[in-house]
Image: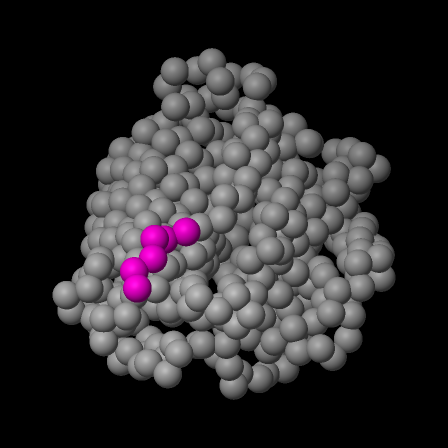
Amino acid sequence: MTHHHIFSRRPLLPVLMAIALALLPRYGQAQTQAVDSTAKTSPIVRIAGIGVPLIAEGLLVKGEDKGFRQLRNHYASDFHSSFDNYLRYLPAAVLLGMKVGGVESRSSWGRMLTSDAFSTAIMGAAVFSVKHIVHRTRPDGSDRESFPSGHTAAAFMTATMLNKEYGHLSPWVGIGAYTVATGTAVMRMANNKHWFSDVITGAGIGIISTEMGYYLADLIFKDRGLTRHPDTDLFYRDDRPSFAGVYVGFGLPLSDYRMKNGATYNTTTGNTIGAEAAWFFNPYLGIGGRFLLSNTGLMTGDDTAEKSYLDYYSITAGPYFSYPLTSRLLLGSHLVAGQAHYGSLSVEGLTQPAANRFTAGTGCSIAFRAHRHFTFRLFLDYNLYAPQDHGGPWLHTLTPGTSFAATL
């Protein structure tokens, strides 16, 4: 029997859009200059520009945690490593190594250590208090200290410290630091120690804690022990918006799914997570690609049974487009195509073999440059997948979501 697709309507995109609009710069030349601008980022935007959207998303996606965990169970069910216990401190080790080696940083030793001490205290207090208020059970059931992820908070705290002190040298400093932090978060989920919302919230806490720690130290030290002025970000409308970042979306299916024997199931919301990057030749045109892990829920008609998931990943590439509304607010689009791999699927005793199929997609986005080298983006993508079973209906999905990216 053929069913119609269904999907749950969650207020994720409007809420995140409201947060982004609330943080848009309504001051200085950033809104008034037609060609370029020089803006001093306010403390509120500096502290909240990236961290608050991360925490908001962590709270909003808690209802989708089982779907994201299904991705972990499909692709890394046997993973186990203790390396994440040490990886979270790698950015701090690099920071100290560069400082000891004589590489000029943002701050003197005294100012830097004071900033980092404040940051660590704020992060530790926030994580400890929330863990012991929420008492969320870990995915593996080992204890009730899952939310938020302390490892992830520490990793993003140390990454932000490194970027604060040495990000002026190159955007690749921040990219490397946050890649390590993201790797820590991924390993915490792969180790079955945290839900997706745990690590997203932990990342936001780590970033906000560091920004607050540096802000407090700035109030104390003022201009003493400062080798570079930290708060003047130069934004230009003709900047090339090249980026590399993390992609998080929620698939709203627009079609049914058919098994090889002709049985058809209605589809429900799924989840997508992955990486995306694009290199722009000018402010308007670039080329990029993405690697995404996705799933789509299948309804079997048995309300008591656990929802089945169709798991698939895709690799796509193509042209990317951008238009700067202001020096900090950009509209974007893309047109990509490539290959999707469907994993083998068993539903109600029926088996669908794995298959490689064509996929293509497009979409639109609005991006806010919270800092000189970091961008928060809201998007709505449309994706089309050739059927796993030849002759079946093509899989159509709308994917609203967010991206947190380093601007190159």
Please provide percent x and percent y for residue 292.
37, 61
Is 271 one of the magenta-colored residues?
A: no
Write the residue at 44% across / 66% down.
301
Quarter of image, res 100: bottom right
Magenta span? 1-6
Position of 177 compared to 44: left or right? left
Q: 349 and 28: which one is in front?
A: 349
Q: Residue furthest left?
A: 391
Please provide percent x and percent y for residue 333.
30, 38
Describe the colour scheme in one phrase: one colour
Q: 65 and 5: which one is in front?
A: 5
User: How would you classify the magenta stretch by its main secondary structure?
Assistant: loop
Please provide percent x and percent y for residue 330.
40, 31
In the displayed structure, would residue 32 be above or below residue 168?
A: above
In the displayed structure, would residue 194 be above or below residue 323?
A: below
Position of 144 compared to 91: left or right? right
Quarter of image, res 64: bottom right
Looking at the rendered image, the quarter that the N terminus falls into is bottom left
Write the residue at 23% across / 75% down.
260
Number of numbered tags placed on the structure image: 0
Write the residue at 44% across / 50% down.
7
Write the residue at 31% across / 46% down.
382
Please provide percent x and percent y for residue 161.
66, 53
Q: Is residue 48 visible?
A: yes
Q: Is residue 210 visible?
A: no
Position of 292 compared to 16: left or right? left
Q: Residue furthest front?
A: 1
